[in-house]
């Protein structure tokens, strides 16, 4: 029986017409590999699977989803439910902070809180929307946040930041630590699934580097140990970490459990190299594992050294779950050189 992966969405997710999520390219690549992939829109559609990939695109996972996922023994990114900047950032400052350099005002929620607003709109019926606007019109409206969406604001020093930025719980103020070379600003991405990863650097002339405004892109850059340590500390199996190199030191900026910006025309091609990174996670979920290397998908020599798995009709049954759980057993094929080890907490343990 082929392994089954269940991708769990929020009930209001506009699948399949939502943003260009990386997960949809993985879905197609996994199906090419012979893995069964099912989509669950909301907890009512949650069903047994060999691996559950929570893909709830909200900064803080709702309590009912947390409770359900805590009961799932084989969830990806287990326990990672709050990636707000107040939890992730190590650069937060207050109005009396001694920092004398530039600062940036951001939303506490990822992507300007747009996913949360999209969810609320989807949950309101037409009648409730009319009632909502009538109520709002009958009383003084709440002040609008200083920052709208992802259009963050940079100030030369803390003293220039309006008091509203510190008082509004929707906002955070951080030290602004850009990676610069001449008139260029850079942002780095560490995108990963299991043992497969890609490291990129994009450059722009705007201090707020966005994919749409980039003028350069580099791949196959080394990932600093400090950034890998962030992934390990959070227990991340799948996702993306944004970071910069500030004066030679890595600084993590954001964590995403639902990476996107993968347009459909190139999505499957871009995601195929990552797809096999799920196989160690399937092995871990089954109570077994294999030894593997941390493989850069953009470096062919490294790809050749990565252990190759196959599914569907394996020539050799290497891994078979004997763990007592309510999910079906899985079988994966032999690893190159038949190297056997253990895989725990998203990281290899050599024997």
Image: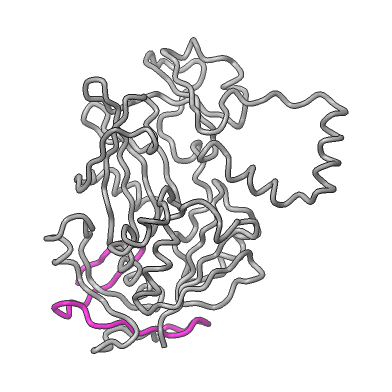
Closest to the observer: 145 or 231? Answer: 145
Indicate the quadrant where residue 117 lies. Answer: top right
Q: Is residue 147 left or right of residue 124?
A: left
Counting labels gives 0
User: Does residue 229 sit above or below 195 in this rendering?
Assistant: above
Q: Is residue 348 magenta?
A: yes
**What percent of the width, then of the height, locates residue 77?**
44, 59
Quadrant occupied by the C terminus? bottom left
Q: Is residue 223 left or right of residue 28?
A: left
**What percent of the width, then of the height, locates residue 145?**
62, 26
Q: What stretch of residues is rendered in magenta? A: 323-351
Farthest-out residue, front: 265
Indicate the quadrant where residue 162 lies. Answer: top right
Indicate the quadrant where residue 46 lies. Answer: bottom right
**What percent of the width, then of the height, locates residue 172?**
52, 28
Residue shown at the point (49%, 57%) measured from the top left: 79
Residue shown at the point (31%, 61%) measured from the top left: 269
User: Does residue 50 sit above or below 176 in this rendering?
Assistant: below
Q: Is residue 86 magenta?
A: no
Closest to the observer: 77 or 271? Answer: 271
**What percent of the width, then of the height, locates residue 13?**
60, 56
Color scheme of the displayed model: one colour
Q: Main secondary structure of the magenta part?
A: loop
Residue shown at the point (30%, 69%) measured from the top left: 276
Residue shown at the point (20%, 63%) measured from the top left: 293
Farthest-out residue, left: 301
Quadrant occupied by the N terminus? bottom left
């Amino acid at each position: 029986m082929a392994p089954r992966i269940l991708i769990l969405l929020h009930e209001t997710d506009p699948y399949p017409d939502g943003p260009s999520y990386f997960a949809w390219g993985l879905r197609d690549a996994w199906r090419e590999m012979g893995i069964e992939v099912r989509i669950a829109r909301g907890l009512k559609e949650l069903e047994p699977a060999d691996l559950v990939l929570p893909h709830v695109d909200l900064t803080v996972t709702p309590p009912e989803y947390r409770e359900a996922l805590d009961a799932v023994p084989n969830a990806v990114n287990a326990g990672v439910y709050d990636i707000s900047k107040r939890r992730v950032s190590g650069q937060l400052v207050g109005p009396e902070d001694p920092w004398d350099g530039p600062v940036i005002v951001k939303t506490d929620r990822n992507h300007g809180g747009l996913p949360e607003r999209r969810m609320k709109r989807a949950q309101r019926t037409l009648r409730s929307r009319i009632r909502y606007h009538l109520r709002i019109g009958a009383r003084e409206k709440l002040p609008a946040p200083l920052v709208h969406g992802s259009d963050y604001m940079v100030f030369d020093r803390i003293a220039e930041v309006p008091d509203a930025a510190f008082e509004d719980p929707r906002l955070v103020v951080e030290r602004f630590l850009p990676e610069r070379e001449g008139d260029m600003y850079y942002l780095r991405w560490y995108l990963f699934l299991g043992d497969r990863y890609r490291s990129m650097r994009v450059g722009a002339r705007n201090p707020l580097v966005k994919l749409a405004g980039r003028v350069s892109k580099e791949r196959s850059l080394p990932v600093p140990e400090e950034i890998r340590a962030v992934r390990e500390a959070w227990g991340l199996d799948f996702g993306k970490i944004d970071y910069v190199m500030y004066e030679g030191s890595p600084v993590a900026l954001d964590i995403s459990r639902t990476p996107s910006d993968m347009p459909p025309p190139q999505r499957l091609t871009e995601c195929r190299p990552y797809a096999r990174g799920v196989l160690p996670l399937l092995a871990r979920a089954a109570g077994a594992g294999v030894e593997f290397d941390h493989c850069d998908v953009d470096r062919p020599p490294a790809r050749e050294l990565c252990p190759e798995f196959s599914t569907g009709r394996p020539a050799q049954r290497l891994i078979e779950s004997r763990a007592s759980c309510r999910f079906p057993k899985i079988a994966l094929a032999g690893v190159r050189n038949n190297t056997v080890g253990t895989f725990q907490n998203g990281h290899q343990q050599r024997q």
